[in-house]
Image (cartoon, rainbow, N blue to C red):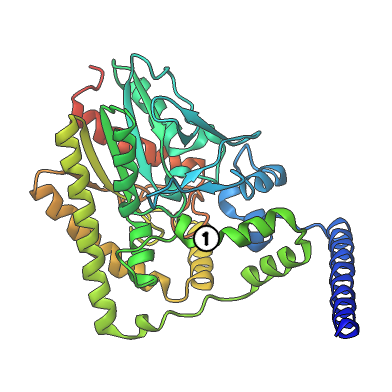
Amino acid sequence: MTCLSGAKLGFVRDVALVIFASFILYVIVDLGFGLIFPAQPYESHMERLTAPAYTNEPYFSEEFLRESFTQPGAWLTPDGTRIVLPNEYQGHFFHIDKLPPTQLTYRRTINAYECTGSKVVLLLGGSTIYASEVPDEYTVASYLSNQLEGRSSDRYFVLNAGVSSSNTTQEVERLQVELSRGLRPAVVVSFSGANDIIQGIYFGNPEGVMFSGANRSQFLELVKKLVPHNIYQRLRLKAERDNRRILPPHLSDVRKTNELVQRTKEVFLNNVLEMQRLSLAYGFRFVICLQPYVLSTKYRSPTADVTEAVKEAEHSLPRGLEAFQLGHHALQEAIKELSEKGVVARDLSNQFADKSSDIFLDLVHVNSVGNKMLGEGIADVILTLLGAAKI
């Protein structure tokens, strides 16, 4: 019995030594691979290096692109919610600040005024508002701040609460958290639509969210932090660049697709009406703006960015443009219905109709010129709503 137990212990020891030696060998090979073939974080989007919309942008460089694809370092989900917050981050082009009174994190807005003594405008939305495609001073929020400063006698402080992948379901939760932590905005703007369409119609789950703490494996997140993964990272980026997403089966079923379109519209309506209810309960003005996408209007001047954005969309989201067309039309109907219910609802689908340069980087994301046009459009709505324009 003793000899048998000793043999077993020796076998276990030998296996453990082999596993340990293999791990050390893996670490050495992986670190060496990383030194010889360093992966660029933007490798899955190499088209950004030559994108027409970046050609004349003053900030554009590989240094910017690297930071764009690595900030903010982590995304966090507060317990008991499905909202997502960017990690605090202080870079060269990007800054994420934790601000009072909520102690939540926000993408930095280049504001003319401090928060104290100013009317706070809380700007909700997804990645178009977060705007990882541009530095801080070129976001929709920063342009909105500039517009409000130049066109109004009042003082405004714009809080950028946009988060990549966030839809209106998460916006409702974010607004509830903001209010529960003491924020008392004068105006809340939801700039939305695209993520509701992608989540509700393309991914087939109108009630769900694309990204939250519940969607992440904590074990895998820990492994990524502790174990070198240069080879894996290179293979993953190559796969993202080369492979098309598999077409969701429900998009081939007309009846199922139409059901998802209607349910997505219903969820959007209910979420917006809940934000409107909160505005009445807490005494702020609420605005919902339907965001444009690359084919939401007819352009007076044809430019290369539209063609490139459509090509990129067809690669990354097979038949995604069809889903967007159906969903966008449904949400346009929702905006009309919301207006009839007394909600300040605006359709910004035609905001880019007069563009004369390349602005689109993909289906919905734009460069600084596009963000300036969006900031102007939202400012028009706010100043008209408040009757605060300079005379």
- Looking at the picture, tell me which residue is in the foreground, 79 or 383: 79
The type of residue carrying mark 1 is: Arg
- Looking at the picture, tell me which residue is in the foreground, 290 or 76: 76
- Looking at the picture, tell me which residue is in the foreground, 351 or 184: 184
Residue found 63% across the figure and 38% down from its top: 59
Position of residue 115 relative to residue 25, above or below, is above
Position of residue 350 relative to residue 159, above or below, is below
Residue found 31% across the figure and 85% down from its top: 253
Residue found 90% across the figure and 76% down from its top: 14
Place of residue 344 in the rendered image (x, y in percent of width and height, measured from the top left): 17, 41
Which residue carries the number 1 mark? 216
Question: In this image, 319 relative to 94: left or right?
Answer: left
Place of residue 54 in the rendered image (x, y in percent of width and height, measured from the top left): 60, 48
Quarter assignment of residue 236: bottom right
Q: Tell me the quarter of the image containing the N terminus.
A: bottom right
Q: Tell me the quarter of the image containing the C terminus.
A: top left
Question: In this image, 182 relative to 372: left or right?
Answer: left
Q: In this orientation, does residue 211 appear?
A: no
Quarter assignment of residue 26: bottom right
Quarter assignment of residue 206: bottom left
